[in-house]
Image (cartoon, grey):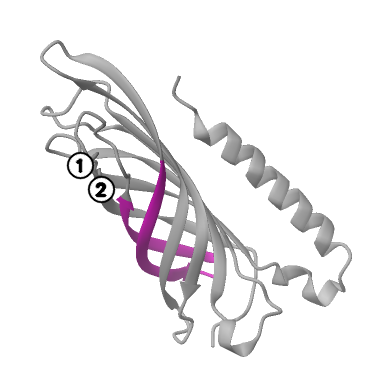
Amino acid sequence: MRINLFPGLTVALIFVCAASSALAQTVPAATESNLPLAVGAGFSGYNPDFGHGHLQGGALWIDYFPNQVPQRLQGLGIEIEARDLSIGRSSTQPANLRQDTAEGGLIYSWRRFHNVHPYGKFLMGFGNTDYEYGALARRGHDSRTITVVGGGADIRVFKRIWARADYEYEFWPDFFKVTNPGGVMTPQGFTVGVLYRFGGRPAR
């Protein structure tokens, strides 16, 4: 059974926001707006590396950049991400093709420019996919622990609202079980979206 990732991420988002709000109540009023958290959503266009063509869908991000870190670690943060690619399939791909991912890891943002923050990231998590295979178009489902490398840039649009342009390259190991050794599936693609920054360390 395919796992629906977005309800779980929504619950996690509500928990993080509630916990952050509670924390903000314990600090002086002058620092309440300095919550180092960003939440965003975007639209993805990917090459799913299954057949030829593209697959589209939505993405969610939660980024946390701690304020109290050594100088050398400023810009280092944690990202949680989920993506559901299930629309806009090419005609050459299975009718049920779908890829869902949820991962977390490290993100490093270069904040030397006031309104543009380039970043790179390394994430690990869980991916699952629905597909069809063989002459009889049998339906399959597979799940993997995946790793993701990527990068992009956040661009300030207005006050706490930022636009994001993001690229990711995913590694799904041992995907094709019928081969020995198993192959590697490497979906990749771009996402554009919007982030709301609650606060955090000002640009350097």
The residue nearer to you, when weighing 146 against 43, is 146
Quarter of the rendering occupied by the N terminus:
top left
Side of 75 where 144 appears, left or right: left
- Residue that appears at 35% across and 67% down: 152
The residue depicted at 78 percent of the width and 75 percent of the height is: 31
Regarding mark 1 in the picture, which secondary structure is present there?
loop
Q: How many marks?
A: 2
Specify whether residue 44 is painted magenta. no
Marks 2/1 in contact by CB < 8 Å: the verdict is yes
Q: Give the camera-side residue of 70 and 163.
A: 70
Q: Amino acid at mark 2?
A: Thr
> Residue at image x 71%, y 51%?
17
x, y percent for residue 115:
45, 78
User: Which range is magenta?
Assistant: 145-170
Is residue 168 one of those drawn in magenta?
yes
Quarter of the view holding residue 62? bottom right
Q: Main secondary structure of the magenta part?
A: strand
Residue under numbered circle 1 = 49
| Mark 2 or 1, nearer chain start | 1
User: Which kind of residue does numbered mark 1 sit on?
Assistant: Asp
Q: Is residue 41 visible?
A: yes
Mark 2 residue element: loop
Marker disc for residue 186: 2
**151 over 90 or under it: above or below:** below
Q: Where does residue 85 sit, x and y in percent of width and height?
A: 34, 36
Q: Is residue 160 visible?
A: no
